[in-house]
Every structure is written in structure tokens, then in C-alpha cells.
Amino acid sequence: MRKFIDQFSRFFIGILFIFSGLIKLNDPIGTEIKMEEYFEVFADDFGSFFLFFKPYALEIGFALIVLEVVLGIAVLIFYKMNITTKVLLGLIVFFTFLTFYSAFFNKVTDCGCFGDAIKLTPWQSFTKDVVLVVFILHLFWYRKTYQPVLYTKEGNIVILISTIVCTGLGIYAIRHLPFIDFRAYRIGNNIPQQMQPQEQPVFEYVFQRKDNGEEVHSEKYLGDTLVYKYVSVRQTNEDKTKAKITDYSVSTVEGEDITQSTFQGEKLLFIIYDASKASVNNIDKIRQLVKDLDGKVEMMVLTASSAEQFEAFRHEHQLAVPYYFVDATVLKTIIRSNPGITVWKDGTVKGMWHHNDTPEASEVLERLKD
């Protein structure tokens, strides 16, 4: 029995940690956003010193992601289990605290355990971590009895290569865009459709027959009170009655809502969520793109910066594009680049580029032909 539990724990923990880490490695900026959210919450609840870590959210999150993947690989090959299980235990205790805190106090409603690929409620995340603790404790308890799958030299090489590859993949994703886009704003999605629920609510009513006490389930309310006694009701498709996008809203400097106009015709959107942190390494390419598409495609800048701040940025870099205001979190969700570029046709996302991959005007026009 113990041998079976050993192997199950090994593969369950190893594969889950690798899977979870790779999902987040696909989108390190998403983890950065989540870490910033935690630091802000902790600063309010425990002390403002947590804000010291906020500027380093990307680096901290990135290190945790790589560590998660490497630990998963280490468990699979029983690599130095004495140290591996200690680090695993420390990490899972930390994660369990975060998910419990999120669930109990309703502070961070999505822990980001599996990025945007798999959404878990805070209590689901906490339950998942509790299960992991059980199997990690088993590995920790018997850590000195496990024999490495590889010799020390080969094991060191595997861990070193894994660390290098994960670091390289993560840096590439940061400097470009996620390899696989799980967000609602991904290429091919129609944004107005994403703002509507998939289904209307469906309810299941539970009644009890008064003559024999039999429990009856029905999608309709049974109004015959002489025969049935009402017990309870629950919604059976709650996950499909919530729109995937609920907070996209665009306004002018004067406060006029122009959200619907962004879904009309062809729009080239430049996303600059924070002008003070926007990279200007490729601003000349963006400026050239604006010049080449002038009169061919309607262009807009969406920003969360103040009007004064963005006016200064626009004049400094000669970015002759009208700008509008959108919530910063929404802009970070639309694209993981500051600045970023996306082209929409009648509300459907046709293309998306990191500023490091600023397209030529011909490529933008080609995307709009589809």
C-alpha cells in the first residue's frame, strides 16, 4: 500500500506542479498582476510595508513560477528529496495560507493558480491546496527513503536545463505575448458577445410530497401546495450565466461613454495603461504605424493614466492619436504589453501585438481583410 501511495504522490504532485507552473509560465504578466493584488490587500490588512514588494511583483512571481515547475520535475525524478520536499512543504503552506485568506475574507476572488486557463473559486483553490498538503506531507515524512531515479550528475543536469529552459520561455513570454491566449480578449473572439451570458439561468426546485414524503426535483415551480411542500432551489448553470467580460467600458475626457463605438467598424487600438511605465523602446515604430495607417483605419489610444499625464506623454513622443479612458485592470487583461496594439473589426479581435513586435501597416490591413 505504501509503495502505491509513494508513486501516486510522486506523479500527482510532480505533474500538477509542472502543469500549474507551465500555465503561469505562459503568462508571467498575469502572475505579476495577481501578486500586485495580493500586496495591495496585505498592505491594507497587515501593514503598508507590503507595498515595498509591489514594484518587484514580476520578479517575485516569475521566481515562484520557475520554482514550481522545477520542483515538479525534481519530485518526478526523486531529486534530492530531503531538500526538495522541504521547499515543497514551505511553498504549499504559503499557497494554502493565501487561498484560505482569499476564501475566508473574500479578498482576492481568483488566486490565479492555473492562470486564465482554469478558473477556481477561492474555496476550490483552498480545497485543492489542502489535498496537496496531504500528499506532500507523505513525501516529506518518507523523504529519506526515496532513491533518485538518476545519478547525481545527471539529476543536476536535468534540474539545471529545466531551470534554464523555463527562464528562457518566461522571458520570451514577457517580451512578446503569451504562447497560448486563454483570455476573453484573444484573437477571434467577438467582444460584445463576450459581454453577454452564454445561457439564461436554469433553476432546479426541490419539493417534498405531503402524502408520502418523497423528494421531487423539477425545473418548474410546482404550485399545488396541497400536494407539494417547497424545500429549496438552486441554479444549475451558474457558471454559464455570467458574462466573461463585465468591466469593459470606454469614456472620453468629458466622461461620455463611447464603449459601443469601439465595436463599430475597423479600430486599431493602442493600449497604454500607464504612461509613466510605458516602454518607449519601439515608440518610433508605433509612430510610423500611425503615419502609415492615417486615413485608412480609425485609431484610438486606451489608457488609465490621467489626462494631464497622457497629454504630456503624447506630446513628448508625438503620438497623434485621440485617447480615451479605460480601467487599468481591464487594459492589462486585454493585452500583456504596455504599450500594446490590437486591431478589431466590428468588435471581433483580428490581431494583437506586443510593442516589441509592432507590425507593419500592410500586416494590419491584411488582418482586417479576413
Image (spheres, rainbow, N blue to C red):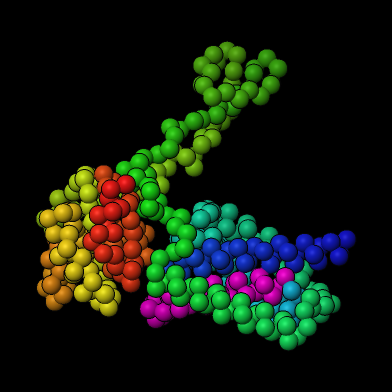
State the residue lying farthest toward the right: 1
Residue sitting at x 26%, y 64%: 360
Residue 12 quadrant: bottom right
- Where is residue 144 shown, x and y percent of the image? 81, 80
Q: Nearer the viewer, residue 309 or 74?
A: 74
Q: What is the number of callouts on the image?
A: 0
Q: Which of 202 and 367 is in front in this view?
A: 367
Asked whether, in this view, residue 321 is left or right of residue 354, the answer is: left
Taking 210 as reference, is 114 above or below it? below
Residue 54 in sight: yes
Residue 93 in sight: no
Residue sitting at x 70%, y 17%: 212
Screen quadrant of the N terminus? bottom right
| Secondary structure, magenta segment, majority class | helix
Q: Nearer the viewer, residue 347 or 232?
A: 347
Range shown magenta: 49-76
Asked whether, in this view, residue 74 is left or right of residue 178, the answer is: right
Residue sitting at x 61%, y 77%: 162
Is 136 part of what is drawn in magenta? Answer: no
Is 62 part of what is drawn in magenta? Answer: yes
- Where is residue 208 shown, x and y percent of the image? 63, 22
- Where is residue 180 shown, x and y percent of the image? 47, 59
Residue 95 quadrant: bottom right
- Where is residue 194 shown, x and y percent of the image? 37, 44
Residue sitting at x 39%, y 76%: 54
Asked whether, in this view, residue 163 is left or right of residue 187, the answer is: right
